Image: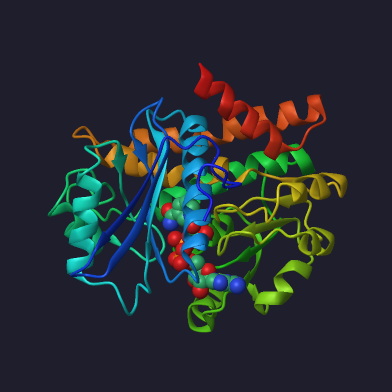
Amino acid sequence: MQIFDHPEFDHHQQIVFGGDEASGLRAIIAIHDTRRGPALGGLRIYPYASEADALTDVLRLSRGMTYKSALADLPLGGGKAVIIADPRRDKTPAMLCAMGRLVESLGGRYITAEDSGSGEEDMRLIRQETSHVSGLGHDGNSGDPSPFTAHGVFCALKSAVRHRLGRSDLQGLRVAIQGVGHVGAHLARELHEAGAKLVLTDVDRDNLGMLVSELSAESVTPDAIFDADVDVFAPCALGAVLTDEVAERLKAKVICGAANNQLATAAVAGRLQARGILYTPDYVANAGGVIEVEAQRHQRYNRDSVMRHVERIAETVDEILGRAQSEDKSPAAVADQLARERLAD
Ligand code: NAD
């Protein structure tokens, strides 16, 4: 397995492989960049088909965190951790405690938090071994960052709609949401309140059914979401969903959603641009969660100021889209360039 020559290596500062015989832990922590502060990023627990897949995922996600935090103006670097295990079958308190010791061994260079496959309860177990963990809530409130992520996506979406469709209200705007889990459901409710008409899908038909009746929305099968006759497509389920094929099928003129690493390849950004589809860079739109998780680490937590910070995502999207238009580049390329400029400052 290549490390330094890995296509996603991209100058990572440190990659740690950790194991624990007693609990069966097999984990990788990737620290991409700490120039702006400690590397904060969630812990993903997933039954990767191979160690190579786990490494590729953690490297891509960790670099994404560097760029996300830089553009959200947070005093943080970028990192991420993965455990190779099925969260429903293999996850045990002993494994999470061993993970906590691995995080502790890095002395605060990496701060962990929840991600897919790990939750608040898991973070409490990890905290038994290390203080370098966030997302545990504040003053008895839940640490779930999803409402903040959803609100940031909502603000980014309004900005993208203004740029591409020239309108500042969402009344009657048609939005397709792929995945109505933690973030997608909050986003759907905010959009409904703002007057948007929703087309929803999810592989979990029960959850979907309840939301569809609550919001008088339309529902379609998971594969049909790409063909929906809508103004906006909001991917809130999986990564790598924007393939060349999907770029050709979409009827939406704007893409803005919460999923990480939405572009299957960098080249898809060009295809979308050629079709006149405005792609809002995912790590800019979905930064609300990390803004909240960072705030939870500090004693003087103030929900209103977190919300104001999350709403500034719209200004960053405005700057990126304005620059993309004047420089005739894709928003994805401009976002990466802006993040690198901030890191070099
Ligand atoms: P979640 O697991 O709660 O929701 C994902 C939903 O997508 C689930 O309901 C699932 O059934 C559905 N789904 C899975 N495969 C699907 C498919 N093929 N078609 C349609 N639906 C499908 O996750 P979440 O916390 O809501 O996060 C959603 C996305 O946003 C993830 O990619 C996550 O990495 C990203 N993200 C989340 C946060 C956060 O604060 N939770 C922050 C940043 C990024």
Q: Residue at x 76, y 51 (%)?
A: 268
**The one of 233 and 333 positioned closer to us in this rendering:** 333
Find residue 304 and report its image quarter. Answer: top left
x, y percent for residue 112: 30, 48
Q: Which residue is drawn at 32% across and 80% down?
A: 89
**The one of 205 and 25 positioned closer to us in this rendering:** 25
Q: Which residue lies furthest to the front in this view?
A: 1
Q: Residue furthest left?
A: 128
Find residue 144 and report its image quarter. Answer: bottom left
Image height of 117 relative to 283, above or below: below
Q: Can residue 255 be seen in this view?
A: yes
Q: Residue at x 76, y 37 (%)?
A: 330
x, y percent for residue 244: 79, 59
Image height of 70 relative to 15, above or below: above
Q: Is residue 132 left or right of residue 250?
A: left
Image height of 274 relative to 302, above or below: below
Q: Can residue 180 be seen in this view?
A: no
Find residue 323 and report its image quarter. Answer: top right
x, y percent for residue 155: 56, 42
**The one of 163 and 87 positioned closer to us in this rendering:** 87
Q: Which residue lies furthest to the right in this view?
A: 274
x, y percent for residue 152: 51, 44
Q: Residue furthest bottom?
A: 206
Count of residue discs:
0
Image height of 233 relative to 107, above or below: below
Q: In this view, does 155 lie to the left or right of 25?
A: right
**The one of 322 and 128 positioned closer to us in this rendering:** 128
